[in-house]
Image (tube, rainbow, N blue to C red):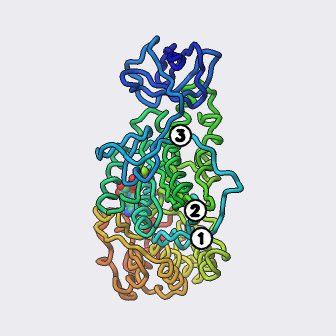
Amino acid sequence: MANASIGSVVSVRGSVIDVRFEEHLPPIYSLLRAGNDGRIVIEVLAQLDSHRVRGIALTPTQGLARGAVVEDTGGPLKVPVGKGILSRMFDVFGNALDREGEVSDVEWRTVHRAPPPLSRRSTKSEVFETGIKVIDVLMPLERGGKAGLFGGAGVGKTVLLTEMIHNMIGHHEGVSLFCGIGERCREGEELYREMKAAGVLPHMVMVFGQMNEPPGARFRVGHAALAMAEYFRDEEHRDVLLLIDNIFRFIQAGMEVSGLMGQMPSRLGYQPTMSTELSRLEERIANTDTGAITSIQAVYVPADDFTDPAAVHTFSHLSASIVLSRKRASEGLYPAIDPLQSNSKMATPGIVGARHYNLALEIRRTLAQYAQLKDIIAMLGLEQLSPEDRNVVARARRLERFFTQPFFTTEQFTGLKGKLVSLKDALDGCERILRDEFKDYPESALYMIGAIDEAKGKAKPGQPSTSAEPTSTSEAKADPKPAADSNRNAKSEPHTKPGEKPRAKVQQAADTHEP
Ligand SMILES: Nc1ncnc2c1ncn2[C@@H]1O[C@H](COP(=O)(O)OP(=O)(O)O)[C@@H](O)[C@H]1O
Ligand SMILES: [Mg+2]
């Protein structure tokens, strides 16, 4: 009887292991162990025939050979849940990574659970303030909603996510759960230290399956994090803030697993089951009458292509999408959020109120008009615009500057003190810019400030502003020219012919459009 759960390895191909069981075939999702002390962990993903199962290793498989003994643990992958996991850092198996010893006061639960049924779900529409101006004004996040931070490599997804953790965790009463999927290990370690230093670790749990781990582990770490989040929601009735960096790596891990299992790839090499896999995970991030899971997910967009199937599928699960643009990052307009591509379903008059809604509409309209005028300005120069259009350009550029914000998490390398801005201050600032109150101020006065009143401290109307510009690392320091100077500047600018690139992109963006 004892050996009903013992099988032997039939084949090893990288992470794919076939195992033969003579008496009892382990069901799908069973966890098998092999090697010294069960060091090698395998999850069953398919039953090939009445005696063989095929699984994927969640650990490296070095040393595993044909004929090796495999033991069926009789259950699926489990992680610890309970009060004891707070302030701890785990891997996908629930092993503590923080050298703080064994976890105590926990119970082990399967990572595979079904989403809550429709009848248990709840919806309430409440705005979740982040203290980041452009997000709170134009794409307010939803308490209990899912927000995505989309962007290619190095446009600031992780920085923005970390800043949100920093801003929200202090006044978020619930539990925060950070799940690192397939990103750099260093980032996890840094975050752990930062959170420890900030004193918020007692309300936080971290789970990591970073890029050095086998695909199986990266594929399951999201489920592990959700099992923990569900515990806090369902048993402790607390609100959970779930932060994922990066959900694309989950899809990617699924693609690797699918490839290893020999499934036929679908479009662009993605797994045919991508949509189901993603929705199984995303649907578990749900609110019930006992608690809400608010989630913010970074989404890497391969090659900056927003039509990539992975990005498209992720978009459809979210209530707010924040799109980061490389162009803005290169101009030093951090956070590099593209307001015209980002949106939130919360931005309706019924939820945010008529004043906020109308302001947001007007801001979007102004920015959209400016975006349209950019081509004309590039070809004909600013002086060819009607005075009305020139005003639009001036307002839009000032809004763009006002939407930049120094972050707490980037203090070390920008040298600027981080700023948290209330929604009221952010709205007031936008309203006053739209009413042309800052028309005579140099644009630079609005760059990297918090509330709008700081602009008045930074520069006087009509004053040249060279010294007001922060010594940040970004190229944007070349940007704001003295207001008096800029007209001349725009005129002397040679008209750009198609295909011609007279100056560096950043410089051009900075100078040519300046009114
Ligand atoms: N808000 C910001 N302020 C200043 N620099 C930033 C900001 N956001 C991003 N950066 C710069 O961009 C780099 C990459 O950001 P990161 O968040 O790691 O990118 P991603 O996660 O999108 O790959 C940072 O190391 C930093 O130099
Ligand atoms: Mg990142």
**Does label 1 or label 3 sit earlier along the sequence?**
3
**Residue 509 at x, y = what percent?**
46, 65
Percent across and percent down for residue 438 are: 46, 85
* Crowd band around label 3 with a 10 angstrom C-alpha radius: few (<14), some (14–19), many (20+): some
Q: Nearer the viewer, residue 363 or 254?
A: 254
Nearest the eye: 282 or 96:
96
Q: Which residue is mark 1?
A: 126
Residue 110, numbered label = 3
Going by the picture, which residue comes out furthest to the right?
A: 119
Residue 144 badge? 2
Of labels 3 and 2, earlier in sequence is 3
Q: Residue at x 51, y 13 (%)?
A: 10
Which residue appears at 46% of the width and 59% of the height?
175
**Quadrant in which ligand 1 is drawn:** bottom left
Secondary structure beneath label 3: strand
**Amino acid at pointer 3:** Thr
Residue 413 as seen in the image, left or right of residue 447: left
